[in-house]
Amino acid sequence: MKLSREQVLHISRLARVSLTEEEVEKFREQLSLLLENFENLQQVDTTGVQPTAQSISLCNVLKEDVVAPSLPPDEVLANAPLREEDFFRVPPVLE
């Protein structure tokens, strides 16, 4: 599927991206090639193939909890822009 110049400009307006004339032509060619690749994928016979969310199985990688000493509050808060006693002071989010 070949995209027209107007279609590329429409896409750029939707994405709120301004393009030069050279970029319009460059992206017209690149997006057209991308759509042609999707057209090729639509022709692949996927009968009997189960839908998947991932191409490989995933498992969580967990690490043992190890008790370790904490840093002293003065060291933790050394670069804090605002500090109140042993806590970070942040601007209120809600009044």
Image (cartoon, rainbow, N blue to C red):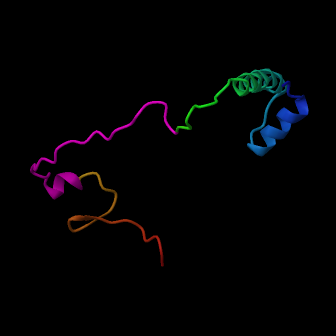
- Look at 40% across and 34% down and name the residue there: 57
44 or 69: nearer the viewer: 44
Quadrant of res 25: top right
32 or 85: nearer the viewer: 32
8 or 58: nearer the viewer: 58
Q: Left or right: 81 with respect to 51?
A: left
- Look at 33% across and 66% down and name the residue there: 89
Quadrant, the N terminus: top right
Q: Left or right: 85 with respect to 24?
A: left
Q: Is the magenta stretch mostly helix, strand or loop?
A: loop
In the rendering, at what x and y percent does residue 19 appear?
79, 32
- Look at 17% across and 56% down and name the residue there: 74
75 in magenta = yes
69 or 59: nearer the viewer: 59
35, above or below 74, in the image: above
Q: How many labels does the image show?
A: 0
64, above or below 37, in the image: below
Q: Left or right: 63 with respect to 27?
A: left
24 in magenta = no
Q: What stretch is highlighted in magenta?
A: 53-77
Quadrant of res 35: top right
In the rendering, at what x and y percent does residue 24 appear?
82, 27
- Look at 69% across and 25% down and name the residue there: 41
Residue ranking furthest to the front: 48
Quadrant of res 37: top right
In the rendering, at what x and y percent does residue 27 appear?
77, 25
